[in-house]
Image: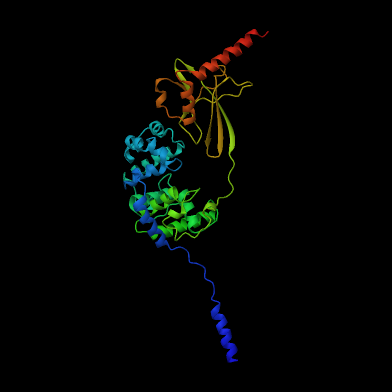
Amino acid sequence: MGRLHQRAHLVKKKRPASKTPPPPGPAAIAGGLERWFRVHGRDYPWRRTTDPYAILVSEIMLQQTQITTVLERGYYWRWLERFPDFATLACAEEGDVLKAWEGLGYYRRARHLQKLAQAVEREHGGVFPRGAEDIEALPGIGPYTAGAIASFAFDEARPVVDGNVARVLSRIFDDDTPIDSTAGRKALWDRAASLVRAAASPRIFNSALMELGQTLCRATSPRCGECPVRGQCTTRRAGELPVKQARIRLTDVTERVFFSQSAEGVLLEQETGARRTGLWKLPALPETQEPPPVLFKCAYGITRYRVTLWVHAPPPDGTWPRTHRRFVAADLAHVAMPSPYRKALEALLDPDGFALKASSNRQRSRAGRHRSSP
């Protein structure tokens, strides 16, 4: 019996229980990213300052616009030159604010930025509040922007999760939970919070986390061999992560407007919808049995819609309302309007007049056919 017991004991010792590898440690990830960023981090103007206003402007501009557009086309610097602080922005005319934002799209961002500036002046005496909770209480500020300003301006240990960060964290933790699901979003924010609390400098760490997603941990062709935290990354399927829920299909929309010009200028219509309230556009074409000749056509995208914009010759007088419309002459370049209409006007008012000449020829041809008909 003693020999059998000894043999059983030896068998147990030869079959140790398998162990699940521990999850990557927050301190190792945070330290590796911070060291890497201090050497390889890109030099953006908002990274050279701790001014919460300048950082806020950059965050709002970059919400739905690429960095190259914001910087190379001068939007960031022109805005700061025109509205250098909360006080200047708070008391500006809305038309001037929208004009300065022209070309960036999603004009609600500009309105929210001004409302926020007014709240800072009114409720905080012009001093931007510290702390993510107080920042998030300001109008138009969500968890991401609050965390970004708290960490970048005040070095507070607050998480930030954008598209780049979501991709990095999904890969490091080998998580295929859809990042746009409730469970996926909670996991991302929890992990980002754990990592930033382990960082020596939240400002540096959050910048590094975002930078990694922009440069190495890219959506396609990730450069895993150069990753500063490849030793802590647990995935072997980087190209398959992150996972998203089923995509929403784009809806095709047709938009028809008309171009009317007289000695008083170009006829414009003021937007009244929630998305572009206060901006000016070409007037909507009233429904007619046969639309007037087409002068210009272009396509543009907005959120879930793919829009085809048709610009027609003016319909007969008396068939369209005059409310919310006025003729604009010399100050046309200073009127705030969405980019698609600006593009159409620039084409229609081109000195060579290709579009207008083509339209005139079509109109003369149509008129000739009508005159010759019995």
| The N terminus: image quadrant | bottom right
Q: Which residue is nearer to you in this view: 21 or 321?
A: 21
Residue 268 in the image: x percent, y percent? 48, 24
253 up-or-down from 133: above or below: above
Q: Is residue 81 visible?
A: yes
Position above or below: 275 against 270: below
Relative to 46, 163 lies left or right: right
Q: Position of residue 104 (x, y in %)?
A: 44, 36
Name, please, the residue furthest toward the front.
Answer: 225
Residue lying furthest bottom in this view?
A: 1
105 w.r.t. 326: above or below: below
Chosen colour scheme: rainbow
User: At x 56% / y 37%, what residue is drawn?
Assistant: 305
* Quadrant containing the C terminus in the rendered view: top right
The percent coordinates of residue 338 (x first, y second) are 47, 31
Using the rendered image of the protein, determine whether residue 203 is visible from the camera's viewpoint.
Answer: no
Which residue is at a point 55% across and 39% down the rendered structure image? Answer: 304
Q: Which of these two is toward me, 182 or 222? A: 222
